[in-house]
Amino acid sequence: MAHKYRGEIDADIGERKRTLVLTLGALAELESAFGAEDLPALAERFAQGRLRSHDLIRIIGAGLRGAGESVNDDDVAGMSVPGGAQGYVRIASALIEATFGSADT
């Protein structure tokens, strides 16, 4: 079960409930993948709200790996979620909010 004070979320991915978290290592992975020079730049990129399908795969994959799953991005690309495309967006958005906070706070 996810621990919200550690930035964890739970999501149904690949026909089972999984925990995701963007650890420091997962954030470093995303900085490199997105060419962000630092965490504020990464957060700013996410705040723009314009994510490609490949971006969702990277974010969800990093979150799964951060929680200890042994998956690569190709594995993640083949996983289904309830709600289809909107489901992937909801998971990535919840993970980003759990990590960086919402724009409202």
Image (cartoon, helix red, strand yellow):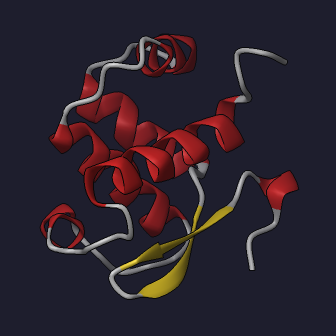
Whether 57 is drawn above or below 75: the answer is above
Nearer-the-camera pick, 82 or 39: 82
Image quadrant where residue 19 sits: bottom right
Instruction: Indicate the position of residue 10 as horizontal and vertical percent values.
Output: 62, 69
The location of residue 15, given as percent across then percent down, is 37, 88
Q: Position of residue 87 (x, y in %)?
A: 39, 56
Horizontal side of 21 relative to 72 (left or right) equals right
Quadrant placement of the N terminus: bottom right
Q: Is residue 105 left or right of residue 74?
A: right
Task: Please say if 1 is above or below 30.
Answer: below
Relative image position of residue 44 (x, y in whole percent):
50, 11
User: Image point 45% across, 67% down: which residue?
Assistant: 64
Q: How many marks?
A: 0
- In this rendering, is residue 64 above or below 49? below
Residue 94 left/right relative to 88? right
Left/right placement of residue 9 relative to residue 53 reads right
Tell me which residue sits at (22%, 69%) in the image: 72
Q: Residue at x 57, y 13 (%)?
A: 40
Quarter of the image with the C terminus in it:
top right
